[in-house]
Amino acid sequence: MTAMDAAKKVLRDVFGYDAFRPGQESAVAAILEGRDVLAVMPTGAGKSLCYQIPALVLPGITLVVSPLISLMRDQVFALLQNGVHAAYLNSTLTSRQYARALDNARHGLYKIIYVAPERLMTDAFLRFAQGANIAQVVVDEAHCVSQWGQDFRPGYLQIEPFIASLAVRPRVSAFTATATQAVRQDIVRLLRLREPYPVLTGFDRPNLYFEVRKTGDRDAELLHFLGEHRGQSGIVYCGTRKAVEEVADMLCENGIEAVGYHAGMPDEQRGCAQEDFVSDRVPVIVATNAFGMGIDKSNVSFVVHYNMPKDLESYYQEAGRAGRDGEDAACCLLYHPSDVRLNTFLIDHSQDTSQMDAQTQLVVAERARERLKQMTFYATGSGCLRARILRYFGEEVKEPYCGNCSSCLAREQERDVTRESAQIVSMVIALNGRYGKSMVAQLLCGKKSERIREKGLHRLSGFGCLSGESEENVRAMIDELVACDVLSVTRGDYPLLQAGERAREILRGDEPVRMSLLPKDATPAVSRRFRRGAGPDKALLARLSNLRKTLAQQQRVPPFIIFTNATLRDMADKKPRTRAAMLRVAGVGEGKMERYGEAFLREIARYEEETQ
């Protein structure tokens, strides 16, 4: 039997899947051949199987460097449920438990060990590692190694010295869901990967619906959104701890079961909130971005950003916690201009740069501002939201419309705006950089507000020249012109529009300008359009879900550890009546069959008898 034949057998017998997902097979093959690997795969693409399967085929131990305690715990619990011997080494263990786990590891009791990066260079762990047969070192959430990434973690800089200290260098694989080209280069350089085999499956998550709602009343809009998604499980991200507490209280006052989560809460309260959400006792959790990176909960049906994040890396990673089971899920950003000021303040007062020299601090801050600029263009610009994300990560976009985001569903149309662009630039020049986007748009649309009359701005020659356009479209044109360096925006509390480097090109009409804009009769409000087919038997699915919940309570594990939602749906669709048929359900391997298979077979049989 070849190594890949063994890998496919593990995939079927242990994890319960008949075929690899895109990117998985090539990553597994490269690792088994002894190559280093750099894999950038979106959340939900099955990154963990790429290294867990080789770990069970290769002789020796696989070390997985992981950034979060909750991630380690969930991964180890899931492996144990599948009959795989695994352990984690982190600060939650007492000194006695830690010593016993290391002793078990020395005696070969574990095939996979999860470890925090800060533990690698400790004396006890080094003694163990230097005497062990380590076949593979896996760096999960590898973007954390790059200080230009959104989650730089200094402990990750210990990984390369740790690997160099081993008598025999193991194969090294690095996995992440979100990394620009610059961050990928940092990962290769800082981990000293040796000609790594690249796995880049693409950043697109077709099952995710992206939406931006520009609103002055976020609470009302959030309540409206949650009303549309009643009965579903989801996360609401807030920019500050205070906002978390206020939003959680507001939801509870309006009859929505919700818990709050942020790093300033007592450990016990924070732990209870997480457990209530993960175990499906509470459908909604309101949290700062400290929550979620290590939560392996598959049935998150929506993610709402109450505040705009500081960059698209953070946004896409956090939004990507929805729909990990492959089902349709919604990702909604509630945008307000104050978010830009909040994030600018956080960049300018960041504590993470305190150990850097002055020049490095300037470079880091400038890059952070540029990422915030791109995030703002996503929230305020026109065109397909999915295309904006994919282009940001360097992926070629073949189709300008995805048909599954609020911009595409709002019937935006691409048209020639060469003349309109020149009129916008002329107005900005006429105002001599004294006003911001809102005022410029009002003047172009011919709005005669009291302030405009007082200042006599309605007498400008360009006043009302775009009166046939909606103010929203004019704002979108301005955003596109800023993005293309035709216009520029000053920094500060009151951003002002000025002519940019390419302003003269537009005024001369050197080349046509085309933009995707709303038709004049379009309404900004767009309803979520679901794309599901008939789906499984809903009554049976409900019974299987209740059985899973009961078993999870008995085992004291989250329900998705028993079976994911996708597995239950496949089970309800196939209605297996025998052991062999149950093993053909996606996600049911030998270990899960032995633990839970008979209970679910009995429930299916009872249901069919009752409904005949």
Image (cartoon, grey):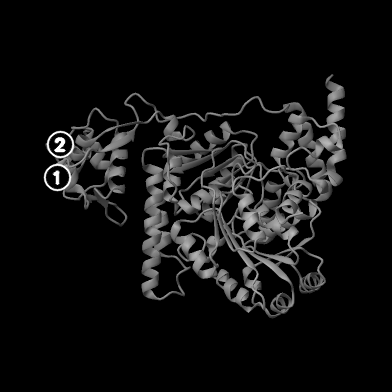
Could you say which quadrant of the image residue 588 lies in? top right
In the rendered structure, which disc, 2 or 1, sits on the residue that comes first in sequence?
1
Nearer to me, 381 or 102: 102
Q: Secondary structure at mark 2?
A: loop
- Residue 553 lies, with reference to residue 51, above or below; the image says above
Check disc 2: other Cα within 10 Å, few if <14, some if 14-19, many if 20+: some
Q: Amino acid at mark 2?
A: Gly
Q: Residue at x 87, y 28 (%)?
A: 606
Q: Point out the residue furthest to the front here.
A: 1
- Residue 149 lies, with reference to residue 117, above or below; the image says above
Q: Quadrant of the N terminus?
A: bottom right
Residue beneath label 2, please?
462
Task: Where is residue 151? Give x, y as percent.
Answer: 52, 61
Task: Where is residue 326? Give x, y as percent.
Answer: 62, 40
Disc 2 and disc 1 in contact, CB within 8 angstroms: yes
Nearer to me, 322 or 248: 322
- Residue 303 lies, with reference to residue 75, above or below; the image says above
Task: Where is residue 447? Give x, y as percent.
Answer: 23, 33
Check disc 1: other Cα within 10 Å, few if <14, some if 14-19, many if 20+: few
Q: Quadrant of the C terminus?
A: top right
Q: Amino acid at mark 1?
A: Ala
Q: Secondary structure at mark 1?
A: helix
Residue beneath label 1, please?
430
Nearer to me, 489 or 325: 325
Q: Residue at x 80, y 40 (%)?
A: 583
Q: Would residue 121 appear left or right of 459 to someone viewing this image?
A: right
